[in-house]
Amino acid sequence: MTHLDRDARVYVAGHRGLVGSALVRRLEAEGFANILTATRDELDLRDQSEVSRWFEANQPDYVFLVAGTVGGILANSTRPAEFIYDNLMIHGTVVHSAYETKVHKLLYLGSSCIYPRDATQPITEEQLLTGPLEATNEWYAIAKIAGIKLCQAYRRQYGCDFISAMPTNLYGPGDNFDLDSSHVIPALMRKFHDAKQSDPNEVAVWGTGSAFREFLHVDDLAAACLYLMEHYSDDSHINVGTGVDLSIKQLAETIRIVVNPDAQLTWDKSKPDGTPRKLLDVTRLRSLGWSPSIDLDAGLASTYQWYLDQIGSRSELRGVEQSTAPTQS
């Protein structure tokens, strides 16, 4: 077990993103006094020389590497070069600088999309690299797999205490609601929200609704990351999820009730469903003593309220504004 001194210098790489902002909230709530952050204007995480200088100047004790270029099926399919280049470079620069400055421990956050498209359900950690990836997000997945292997390589060659965690699909305050780059929950919320102003009050959803997905509230993930930093030290990556999933159709109906109960739901079957099912086996995480605490219904309601707060409306629509939530963390 690694006890993190609350006065330790803790760097959150990607503090403005969905996960990073949740981690900062969690660390502050836990009494950490020296949380280090840097905006993109202050530090380009793709530039090794910049990152090396920053680490040398700031000397973090612990690092949460949660930065990256992220997005849904559309963003992955239309910006493949950005997704693979940005993420490969960010992982490489931060991990190498953490090694150079003798950081005590680093947690690297990946994604459940690292697993094969047709992985046996629920997906155990051992299924990594046992089959072809889902084509709609392979660029991002390959970069994330490289991040896992990077941490393993530095652990094996240099003895660095670098660990990797693979979360399931995330949502919560700080999410990206831009329809061109968002994931399924904020995209559906935005569509149902916007439809309140349209005639007919109708929402078209990609695919058939038959795919199954697991969702974890980002505040639960932040709690899990801190828990793993203190309780886990192993070469293998570890899954982080709820162990429960639902169909996209069920999800859309649930969000419709939360956001716009009067809306009509239609399905654009010409669009892809993505991976048929992606449920993580969380046995290893549960055996360490951690489990999530926020159920999906409550999490969706609070996330939608957060979105309303961002656009300055707490009740009926008075105009739709573009979300300014970042697509990168």
Image (cartoon, rainbow, N blue to C red):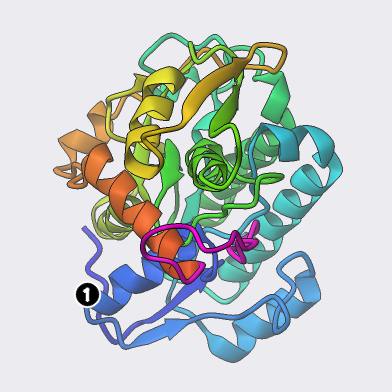
Q: Residue furthest left?
A: 289
Q: On the image, which quarter does residue 58 sit in?
A: bottom right
Task: State the residue in front, 89 or 199.
Answer: 199
- Which element is circle 1 on? loop
Measured as percent of width and height from the top left, residue 262 is found at: 40, 33
Give me the residue at 53% from left, 44% from top.
Answer: 110
**109 on left or right of 328:** left
Give me the residue at 37% from left, 21% from top.
Answer: 250
From the image, which quarter does the N terminus lie in? bottom left
Measured as percent of width and height from the top left, residue 122 is found at: 35, 16
Let me know if residue 167 appears in the view: no
By secondary structure, the bulk of the magenta-drawn segment is best described as loop
Label 1: how many Cα within 10 Å (few below 14, some 14–19, many 20+)? few
Measured as percent of width and height from the top left, residue 212 is found at: 43, 18
Chain part drawn in magenta: 311-329
Amino acid bearing label 1? Glu
Please name the residue that numbered disc 1 is placed on. Answer: 30
